[in-house]
């Protein structure tokens, strides 16, 4: 299915890419498909000062492959703003990328350092979601 068709089906949907490169994006989409990743987070300043659209509880959004083709439609089930240092193990494990809070902190600190800076007190947009449609697999 093409992105334009999905935008007609989900007119309020924002589109976005997981991660900051092709390999990370592919890994994160795979984890979502496997049911291991049901949460994500981003720096609040990317939403307020950048071009990222803030997730909205109940809205469906379109996750893109790194090449811009649609991969998944997800529905946001919860959005919270938390400081990096206040993210708990429950949320970290829902992200599906690590098996501990320490691993999550290490990987996310490196990610934020690559993408605009890191601070223990930085505010994050923490989103929980569910898959509505796997565009590439037709479900």
Image: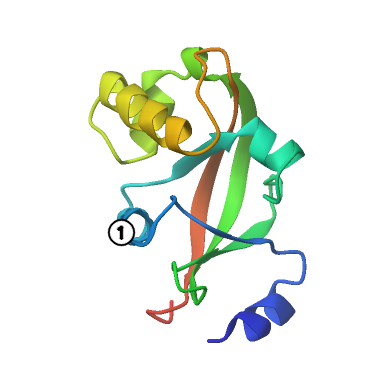
Secondary structure of the residue carrying numbered label 1: helix
- Residue in the foreground of this view, choosing between 45 and 126: 45
Q: Position of residue 52 (x, y in %)?
A: 67, 49
- Exactly how many numbered labels are in the figure? 1
At x 43%, y 18%, the residue is 88
In the image, residue 18 above or below residue 86: below
Residue that carries the numbered disc 1 in the rendered image: 23
Q: Residue furthest left?
A: 99
User: Viewed as shown, does residue 21 lie left or right of 27?
Assistant: right
In the image, residue 11 above or below residue 128: below
In the image, residue 139 above or below residue 19: below
Residue 65, located in which quarter of the rendered image?
Answer: bottom left
User: Viewed as shown, does residue 64 lie left or right of 45?
Assistant: left
At x 30%, y 40%, the residue is 97
Quadrant holding the C terminus: bottom left
In the image, residue 9 above or below residue 19: below
Q: Position of residue 130 (x, y in %)?
A: 50, 53
User: Viewed as shown, does residue 99 lie left or right of 135?
Assistant: left
Specify how the rendered protein is coloured: rainbow
Q: Position of residue 131 (x, y in %)?
A: 48, 59
- Residue in the foreground of this view, choosing between 58 and 20: 20
Q: Residues within 10 Å of mark 1 (few under 14, many from 20)?
A: few
Q: Position of residue 128 (x, y in %)?
A: 53, 41
Residue 6, located in which quarter of the rendered image?
Answer: bottom right
């Amino acid at each position: 299915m093409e992105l334009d068709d999905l935008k007609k089906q989900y007119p309020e949907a924002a589109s976005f890419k997981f991660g900051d490169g092709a390999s990370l994006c592919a890994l994160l989409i795979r984890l979502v498909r496997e049911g291991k990743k049901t949460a994500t987070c981003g720096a609040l300043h990317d939403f307020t000062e950048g071009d990222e659209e803030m997730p909205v509880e109940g809205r469906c959004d379109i996750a893109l492959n790194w090449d811009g083709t649609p991969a998944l439609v997800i529905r946001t089930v919860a959005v919270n703003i938390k400081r990096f240092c206040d993210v708990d193990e429950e949320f970290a494990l829902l992200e599906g990328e690590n098996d501990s809070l320490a691993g999550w902190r290490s990987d996310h600190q490196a990610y934020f350092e690559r993408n605009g800076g890191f601070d223990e007190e930085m505010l994050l947009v923490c989103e929980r979601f569910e898959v509505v449609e796997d565009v590439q697999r037709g479900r």
